[in-house]
Image (cartoon, grey):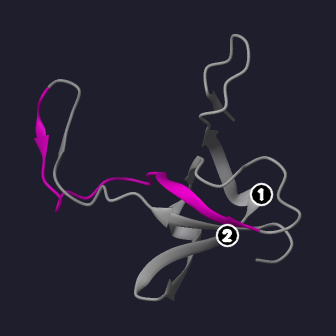
Amino acid sequence: MLHDRVLVSLDDDEGERRSSSGIVIPATATMGRRLAWARVVALGANVRTVEIDDRVLFDPEDKSEVELRGDTYVLMRERDLHAVASERLSDGQTGLYL
């Protein structure tokens, strides 16, 4: 990995979903512009805000997919990330920062 690039593995959310009120939303339902979650699997040398195994939020319309050994990953710049859900918690932090 070079510079500020981040390689992520997409979460498998492509099935039917359930709303908070219990309504089942089928996989074929079209949604408006929606951000996606992914898990970081590799980092470039100049990435500062995320670490491997962090979950990140990004816009799936701005993605570059790459296939490595039969698995599909998304390659993007660090600045294209919208949020990080981190397991590394300090005093009083929520674990999600924007």
Front-most of 59 and 75? 75
Quarter occupied by the C terminus: top right
Q: Which residues are magenta?
A: 22-43
Q: Give percent across and percent down for residue 17.
A: 20, 45
**How many numbered tags mark residues here?**
2
Residue 32 lies in the magenta stretch: yes
Instruction: Name the residue: 61% across, 20% down.
Output: 94
Q: Residues within 10 Å of mark 2 (few under 14, many from 20)?
A: some
| Residue 44 tag number | none
Q: Quadrant of residue 86?
A: top right
Q: Label 2 is placed on what type of residue?
A: Met
Q: Alpha-carbon neighbours of circle 1 within 10 Å: few (<14), some, or many (≥20)?
A: few
Residue that mark 1 sits on = 79
Q: Check residue 76 in the rendering and tell me which mark sits there, or answer none.
A: 2
Left-right relation of 73 to 83: left
Place of residue 45 in the rendered image (x, y in percent of width and height, measured from the top left)? 86, 67
Looking at the picture, which amino acid does disc 1 mark? Arg
35 on left or right of 64: left
The residue that appears at 82% across and 58% down in the rendered structure is: 47
User: Which residue lies at the image location 75% right of the left edge and 59% below the top edge?
Assistant: 78
Q: Quadrant of residue 52?
A: bottom right
Please indicate whether residue 1 sits to the left or right of residue 29 in the image: right
Q: Which quarter of the picture shows residue 87?
A: top right
Q: Position of residue 4 (x, y in %)?
A: 82, 66
Q: Secondary structure at mark 1?
A: helix
Let me know if residue 9 is in the magenta part: no
Of the 4 image quadrants, the one containing the N terminus is bottom right
Rendered position, 65 above or below 84: below
Question: Distance of mark 1 from mark 2, alpha carbons?
Answer: 8 Å
Q: Are marks 1 and 2 in contact (CB under 8 Å)?
A: no
Q: Position of residue 54 (x, y in %)?
A: 60, 47
Q: Secondary structure at mark 2?
A: strand
